[in-house]
Structures are given as C-alpha cells and as structure tokens.
Amino acid sequence: MVKALMVVLLVVIMAPLLGGLLTGIDRVLTARMQGRVGPPVLQPFYDVLKLLGKEALAANRRQVAWALGYLVLIIASLALFCLGGDLLIIVFTMAFAAGSFVLGGFSVRSPYSHIGSQRELLQMLAYEPVLILLALGVYLQTGSFMVKDLFHQSQPLLASMPLVFIALLIVLTIKIRKSPFDLATSHHGHQELVKGITTEYSGPYLALIEVTHWYELVLLLGLAAMFWTHPLGAGILLALAAFFIEMVIDNICARLTWNWMIKFTWTGGIILCLINLGVIWVLRAGGV
Amino acid sequence: MELINKSRVKSPWLLHYDGSSCNGCDIEVLACLTPIYDVERFGIINTGNPKHADILLITGGVNKKAARVVKNLYEQMPEPKVVVAVGVCACSGGVFHDCYNILGGIDRVIPVDVYVPGCAARPEAIIDGVVRALQVLAAKTDKEAVV
C-alpha cells in the first residue's frame, strides 16, 4: 500500500517534468527540421508558468470543472499504468478523460470550440477500437490484461505484435495531436479552428490543459514502451523512437480531413490489428 | 513570483490584427515567423486567439468599422497585456490620416505601449518593438507587485 502511494506520488511529480521536457525537445527538433533555430528546450515550462501568472478568465464554472476532470482522470490512468494495472481499465479511463475534455469544449458558446469538440469525438471514434484491440492482443499473447504481467514475458511483445505496434503509431499521431490528424486542436505554431477545443480556455486553465497533455504524452509513450519490457531500457528507446517518428510525420504531412482520419484508422489500423491477432490465435491453436 | 515574471518575458504570445492596413506591414509581421528571422527563438508564438495572447500587434490605422473589433479583441485578452502599433498608419494614421473613414492611429481606440514606425515596418524593427513591449510588460507586472 505504502509502495503504491509512493509510485502514485512519483508519477504525479515526475510525469509532467518528463512530459514538458519531451515537448520542449519536440519543439526544438521540429524547428531544426524546418531550418529554424527554435525555442529553448525549457520553453514549455516558461509557457505554463506564464499562463499560471495570467488573469484567471473562465467562460463559466463548468468549463473549469471539466478541465479538472480531464487532468484527474489522465493522472488516474497514468497511475494505474505505472502500478501495473489492468490494460482495459486504463483504456476506459483514458476514454473518460477524453470525454471530459470534450464536454469542457461543449460547455462554452464558441463555435470553434464546438467544432473542435465534435472533431475530438470523431478522433475517439477513430482510435478507441485500435486501443481495445491492442489490449485484446496483449491478452491473447500473455493470457492477462495486467501490465505488470508483461514483465514475466521472456520475449518482447514487439516480436509477436509488430502490426499492432504500427497501429499504435497511428493512434499516437491522433492522441498527441500531430499532423495529419491534429483536427480538434493543434500545438504551438499551428492553428486549426483558431485553437479548436481549447479556444475558450485562457490563463491558468489553459496551463491546466497543457500539463494534462504532458501527463498524457508520458502515458502514451508508456504504452509504446510496453512492447519491450526486458530490459526496460529497450522499451524506453522504442518509445523515444516512436516519438521521433511522430515528429517526422508531423513535419512532412499536411492536415487531413476527419473523413480521411476515420477511413485510415478503421481500415489501416483495425485491419493491421486483426491480422496480427489472427496470426497469434492461429499460432496458439497450432501449439507453436 | 520571480519565476513567473521571468517566464512572462520568455513566452510572449502574439495576436496579430489588421486594422485597415494595405497588407505591407502584415507581410512583414509574417516574415518574422520564417526561418530567416524565426521569432520562436524568443518563445514568441503567433496565436490567432485573443484569449491566449499577451501582445496585441496591430497594423494599419483604425477605421469606423474596425474600432469595435479592436476594442473587443483588447478586452478579450487576459491581463497582463501590451499593445504594439506596427507601421506608420497604426502609429498616427499615416498617409490615410485625412480619409473620411479613418479615425487615426490605434491609440484613438485603445492604449498603445510601443510604436513601431516604418512604411512598411521592417521585420527587424517589429522584433525590436516586441522586445521593447516585453520590457513594458515586465515593468507593468513590477508595478502591480508593488501595489
């Protein structure tokens, strides 16, 4: 119990520091890919500190409540993940968190925020099936939904689930809001629907959303690291490689429409997952 | 508090509005974002959203239609904020000061902190103006701290 509390405390303190640093590295590397010098690595921290110091203007109280819900639920799913919890519960908690974010966007009257929220719902529609198939794949391969049981595997998940990993990369593009799928809202220099779902958040409340994105980034990269648990260092390298691939995709792609996103994830993502799951099932039935 | 004040200077987010400019200054503002000038070095981001912005950059003089919009944008920005008038038209109305529809410079409608002259204002001058605006921002927050 005490150990679990320590882990949760560590997650709450360390994850945003790590997430902010990764975001800063992302901004510098993105700038270099575009032939620019780019901001300092600590820029995301300056941004959030500045936002915390700004006047607290909220459109209404519900907006703030939903933003807090988003933060708390993302922290909960990250804590569950770090405690080696049930993968299905983690996926569902993430869905609730995203739902809270959507309701925050709907609780104001700005049309930009509304369209952003509708697109966020479409994004959930696109990536949720892939995430659930990922959890199912983990169960088929290891016989357990628990993240901690992955550490008892002799062989990395990547060897048996390479196609699911590729599908996860598609989900990552949507979830960490990178082109071509940054439809609901977009990062730093980019603009979409003014600022989409976050248009009506300002000052400290925008800082809250920003910090939640950091937690979410760490959680998503954790899902990528899960594919190589022995040694864990390899998994972390795998996650960082996935993050770098996302940056490259972000810089070479234009933003696509939501129709494309649904078509791409429901054909590409789901079919990749199903083929991989089928192969695992056949191999298991064959007793290999 | 010290840390927040330091961050304010390091992370100014811009909102760019075209009052009734000929687009000459607007092009120069956008030139600041390109790899040659790269204002993101200073943490500057072009937001396009008054609710996220710290610095309001206005080009062109104010006409009767735009006055309401300029006021509205200014009021939507959360404190602390500064206003930079870019180009001679934004400073005083410029060659259009006598036009039937022009009210004059931006300071006829909202308080302006920094004036950047030029027709069109060069990107270097605009970046310099924004850096001056950051000093004004820092001074404003210091004064608040004293009060």
Image (tube, helix red, strand yellow):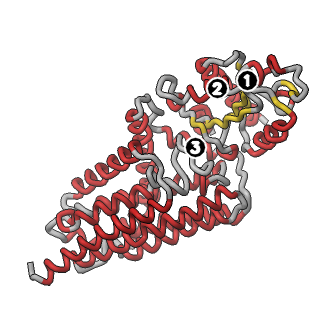
Which quadrant of the view contains residue A132?
A: bottom left
Residue at 53% from the left image edge and 50% from the top image edge: A186
Residue A59 position (above or below residue A241)? below
Return the residue at label 1.
Answer: B114
Residue that sits furthest to the right in the current view: B100
Chain identifier of the residue bearing label 3 in the image: A
Chain identifier of the residue bearing label 2 in the image: B
Q: Are marks 1 and 2 in contact (CB under 8 Å)?
A: yes
Residue type of the residue flagged with mark 3: Leu
**Closer to the camera, A264 or A141?**
A264
**Closer to the camera, A114 or A240?**
A114
Q: What's the CA distance linking mark 1 and mark 2?
A: 8 Å
Q: Residue A282: where, in percent of width, then height?
A: 16, 79
| Left or right of A268 on screen, residue B60 | right
Residue type of the residue flagged with mark 2: Val
Return the residue at label 2.
Answer: B130
Q: Which mark is residue A49?
A: 3
Q: What's the CA distance linking mark 3 and mark 2?
A: 20 Å
Q: Residue A68: where, in percent of width, then height?
A: 60, 63
Q: Is residue A174 visible?
A: yes
| Left or right of A231 on screen, residue B144 | right
Q: Are marks 3 and 2 in contact (CB under 8 Å)?
A: no
Q: Residue A11: where, in percent of width, then height?
A: 42, 59
Secondary structure under the numbered disc 1 in the rendered image: strand
Rendered-image quadrant of the C terminus of chain A: bottom left
Secondary structure under the numbered disc 2 in the rendered image: helix
Residue at 91% from the left image edge and 26% from the top image edge: B100
